[in-house]
Amino acid sequence: MSWHVASITLDNLDELPKRCRGCVFWELSDHLGKQAAEFASTDLEKEAWVSGVLLEWGSCGKIVHLRGVPAGYVMYAPPSAVPRAAEMPTGPVSADAVLLTTMQVLPEFAGEGLGRMLAQAVVKDLTRRGVKAIEVFGDARPGTEPSCVIPAEFLRGVGFKTVRPHPRWPRLRMELRAAMMWKEDVEAALEQILGSVTIPMQPAAPVQPHVPARASR
């Protein structure tokens, strides 16, 4: 499987699926989101949000390419940068956590393990940045609107634990302290947190046998 994960920037933002490119469910409050839709400015609002978070906080998303084409993406940010988080019934997000907002894999790439791969990329990025935990609002009834909330069942499957239950919008959390302790082997930590994920690696170079030097006569 030939794949590549890159950080989301203004240069590749248009590679997001069309409906996601203009979705501002998380980026704006409900009231402002409706206004943006009314004035057909959601694309501009999305771009402004990404630009602001990149400048003030840093990387806020990953996009995965499979066989050379965009196949899925994930976005995350500090809770203070996500207005809709304050309107969720199971908020607020803990002060020590970064909020994972949305993750999408295109239907034609379902079953390729890209969801786990994207989750792994987020954990790796935030662990290296010293974040203590990730929290996320899950959808206990996926398949209905809005579709940009990650299914709770998937989140539990990759290591998140429910910290505030709800019949529709449970809040889940993943602790990253354990991963931060394994500084000498981040990949091993991710395997323990997220389960088995196949990552292509270069084979180790063969060890050359040591030949003692001959003594000079």
Image (cartoon, grey):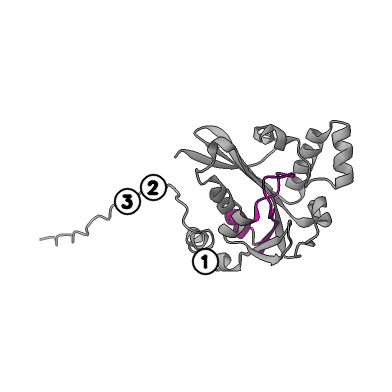
Q: What amino acid is found at the position of numbered circle 2 in the picture?
A: Gln
**Quarter-of-image position of residue 208:** bottom left
Asked if 15 appears above or below 161 in the picture, the reply is above
The Cα atoms of the two marked residues, 2 and 1, are separated by 22 Å
Badge nearest the viewer, 3 or 1: 1
- Please report contact status of discs 3 and 1: CB closer than 8 Å, yes or no: no
Q: What amino acid is found at the position of numbered circle 1 in the picture?
A: Trp
Instruction: Classify mark 1: residues with Cα within 10 Å, few (<14), some (14-19) or many (20+).
Output: few
Whether residue 74 sits left or right of residue 112 in the image: it is right
In the foreground, 88 or 61: 88
Residue, disc 2: 202
In the foreground, 43 or 146: 146
Instruction: Classify mark 3: residues with Cα within 10 Å, few (<14), some (14-19) or many (20+).
Output: few
Among the two numbered marks 2 and 1 on one chain, the one whose residue lies closer to the N terminus: 1
Q: What amino acid is found at the position of numbered circle 3 in the picture?
A: Ala
Whether residue 158 appears in this view of the structure is no
Residue, disc 3: 205
Q: Which mark is residue 182?
A: 1
